[in-house]
Amino acid sequence: MFDIWAESFGMIGPDQFVADFGYLPSARVVYRGKCTGQFAEDVRRGKYSVAEGVICKGGAGGTDLWMAKIKTCAYLEKLKAAFADRWEDFWE
């Protein structure tokens, strides 16, 4: 689990999600801070030991929420091997 949608509010923000639902099986938090180019490079190069990549979220939730995916280079190579010229269909 990594998302919760609350009717009439929208998507729960990352801090509230961890506070309210962190005791349930969910995606591991690997980093807290600004989503920078250096963080993206660190994810892509395998610094955080994730199999596929990360979902980055920021904001308080509802209409003040942003999300992005960052995949690892190792996962990119697996996609290219498995799907050849269709690998981009499964990328970020």
Image (cartoon, grey):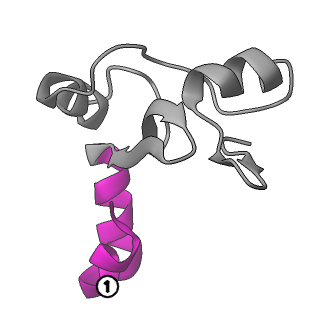
Q: Judge whether 52 appears above or below 84 on screen.
A: above
Q: Judge whether 62 appears above or below 91 on screen.
A: above
Q: Residue at x 37, y 80 (%)?
A: 83
Q: Nearer the viewer, residue 58 or 46?
A: 58
Give the residues drawn in magenta, as a range: 74-92
- Furthest residue toward front: 8
- Furthest residue toward left: 37
Magenta segment's dominant SS is: helix
What residue does disc 1 label?
86
Amino acid under label 1?
A: Arg
Residue 30 position in % (x across, y down): 48, 19
Residue 39 quadrant: top left
- How many numbered tags mark residues here? 1
- The quarter of the picture where the N terminus appears is top right
- Furthest residue toward right: 24
Residue 59 position in % (x across, y down): 44, 31
